[in-house]
Image (cartoon, rainbow, N blue to C red):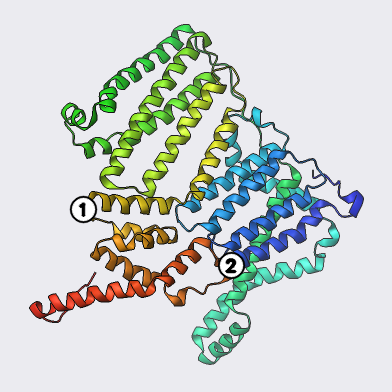
Amino acid sequence: MIDTDIKSSTGISRASLAVPLAVGLGVAADQLILRQGLTGVGFLCWMVILLASVHFLVRSEKESRWQIYWSVFALAAAFLLSYRATPVLVPMMLLVLLGCGVNWLLQHRAINSRSISVLDYPWTTLRLPLLFLLSLRYAAGDVDPALLPRSRVRGVIKGLLLAAPMLLVFALLFASADARFDGYLSTVSQVFSFMAVEHLITMTLMSIVAFGLLAMALHKPDPGQVEVSQTLSLGREETLIIMGSLVLLFLVFVVLQAGYLFGGQSIIEQTSGLTLAEYARRGFFEMLVVAGLTLMLLLAMSGLRCDLRYYRPLAAIMVLLVLIIMISALQRLLLYVDAFGLTMDRLLALGVMLWLAGSLVGFVMTVLRGCPQGFAFGSVVFGMILLLVAGFMNPAAWVAKTNLERALVSGDNQVDVTYLRRLGADAVPVVLTMFDDLPDQVQCELGRFLTEAWSVEQSATDWRQWNASRVAAQRQVDLNRDKLRRVFDQQLDEFMTSVIPRQGVGIFKVC
């Protein structure tokens, strides 16, 4: 059950204090998030209220420093959602928030970070709905009965909830049958609008969700730690055959890749029979999968009772070979970017590669040294830090700048304007900085897009939708609006002068 330390000083149990806090969070969620989206300051405000409520309820307990760190991590992720406007960052920051919640929950049960295993994270994540419901049940049982509706009031509420759908169905049927009744129903619906009912339902559901989250902080549900069975074991022969055969296979592949790594373009084309672009396109993601599977295999082998005298040196050699393979994959990625440009997907693949490389190095420093404690925790924290760093580095601006510079340096003047549009507000300042150096056709397309997408009428938005990148993009477009329109008008005049006299007036596209 829930601890009731606060009751001795205030006379109110912490579960009872969670009720008004949850109602406030439900109202705040309806006003700050569900109508405005996640990429705005509204979500940041709601996260601040939620974390403040959690720390208020557990303030009588001794919180570990890591629980405070997770709150800082969560606020950083919420801040990035109000600071950046790149669509791909939304799932990345939600992943950071999920990691913060799982880690907070594990350590809230006094589970040391060094004792968290690799399987504890997916196990706890999958059990989150069950832990939520259990905490909700226990917390509801500890709420002060004085805060709950009386039996007669509960009966009225239940009756209204049961009668509402029947009343709605019959009222709609009567409205379809009689015009006068339809008029009365329209008058009533203006008083009790659908929007008001929607707001009420939203606030109720979000209050329940908020109460469940607060209850998880109070109840300390046991996420459970996965106990790995030690019944399966591998002897010396099995360990040597499995690890030795894989090391030999990896070594052959690395030897074949050595010529590509150090031979340059001519060796690649002569040896593989592929052009540089075809070589770069082929094999990159397969190599990433190899690195991920290798890490999983080594972790599985380390959990078994195998012969460590042979496992550890062979595993170290395998990690070294995989790191060399990842260098080859990085070379292919860089060649592919040089040939076709940078995209958010390729940048994300680079981030996954960095995380795998860091996890492999961490595996060598912990598991292979006989200290497996802390590997899972360190790997997850490293991944969360990479996601946050990626958000602060403004990946969309990096992609836009790389592609524009590549087009200008190469001299082909080919710019994927459609992809630049999809990068969103984060890329707008970079595009406008390099706008004057772009080809006329590209200037025309970008000028028309920017003036339409960032019109003056769209600049005034709700404060809950405030986003730093959107504000910066709007400011830059407003400062350059005359120039953008002038470029488009100039292209239109040139088109009218050169094309219309020869082909006549008709349907035409300027840019």
Outermost residue toward the bottom? 180
Q: Is residue 202 visible?
A: no
Q: Residue at x 44, y 76 (%)?
A: 456
| Quadrant location of the C terminus in the rendered image | bottom left
Answer left or right for 375 relative to 396. right
The picture quadrant where one finds residue 47 is bottom right
**In front here: 83 or 20?**
83
Q: Earlier in the sequence, mark 2 or mark 1?
A: 1
What element does badge 1 sit on? loop
> Which three-letter amino acid code belongs to the residue tagged 1?
Asp
Q: Residue at x 45, y 77 (%)?
A: 457
The picture quadrant where one finds residue 86 is bottom left
Tell me if mark 1 has few (under 14), some (14-19) or many (20+) residues whose alpha carbon lies within 10 angstroms of its own.
few
Rendered view: 190 above or below 229: below
Q: Residue at x 66, y 32 (%)?
A: 113
Q: Is residue 88 visible?
A: yes
* Residue at image mark 1: 412
The spot of residue 13 in percent (x, y) is 84, 52
The spot of residue 446 in percent (x, y) is 32, 65
Q: Residue at x 40, y 24 (%)?
A: 322
Answer left or right for 332 relative to 139. left
> Which three-letter amino acid code belongs to the residue tagged 2?
Arg
Answer left or right for 4 relative to 355. right
The spot of residue 141 in percent (x, y) is 79, 51
Mark 2 vs mark 1, foreground winner is 1
Q: Which mark is residue 464?
A: 2
What element does badge 2 sit on? helix
Rendered view: 59 above or below 372: below
| Quadrant location of the N terminus in the rendered image | top right
